[in-house]
Amino acid sequence: MTEITAEKLAKVYVKIRDARRELKRQDDALEEQLKQVAGELLNICKEQGAATIRTEYGTISRRTSRRYWSNDWESFFKFIKDHDAFNLMHQRINTNNMQQFLEEHPDLCPPGLNADIEQTIVITKR
C-alpha cells in the first residue's frame, strides 16, 4: 500500500492548481470572444429596433440593467438618513472593518453577529 505523504499530496495539489489555471486562461479567452459576439448581437438588435430576435439556435433578448453608486458616500449616507431610505442600501457587513473592530474591542460583540471562519491550504511554488 502506498503511503500518503505531504510531499505527494503537495505534488498533486500543484498539478491540479496548474491545470485549473490553464482552464481559466482558456475560459478568459472564450469569455472575451463571447463579449465581442454579444456586442455585435446588441448592435443588430439596436439596428432592427428589436427587443428579441428568434433564431433556430435560441431567442436573442436585449435587456437593460442598471447599477447605481455614489462618489460622495458621506453626503449620500446623510441623504439616506434624512429621508429614512435605508432600504436603498444592501445589508452587508464589511468583513475587514468588522475584523479590525473586533480586534480593537475584544469585549464588544454586536448583537446577532455571525461569523464563518475557514482555514485553507495554499502551496506556493519553490
Image: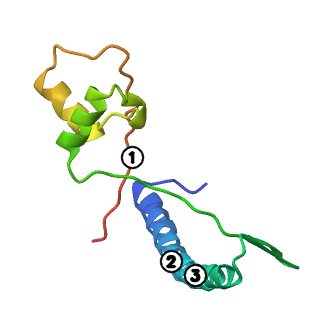
Disc 1 marks which amino acid? Thr
Callout 3: 10 Å neighbours few (<14), some, many (20+)?
Answer: few
| Pointer 3 residue | 39
The residue mark sitting in front, 1 or 3, is 3
C-alpha gap between disc 2 and disc 1 = 25 Å
Left or right of 107, for residue 120: right
Q: Is residue 90 visible?
A: no
Q: Residue at x 19, y 41 (%)?
A: 75
The residue mark sitting in front, 2 or 1, is 2
| Pointer 1 residue | 120
Q: Residue at x 72, y 75 (%)?
A: 50
Q: Is residue 29 visible?
A: yes
Q: In which quarter of the view is residue 94 placed?
A: top left
Disc 2 marks which amino acid? Asp
Quadrant assignment for the C terminus: bottom left
Q: Secondary structure at mark 3?
A: helix
Left or right of 119, for residue 30: right
Badge 2 vs badge 1, beta-carbon distance below 8 Å: no
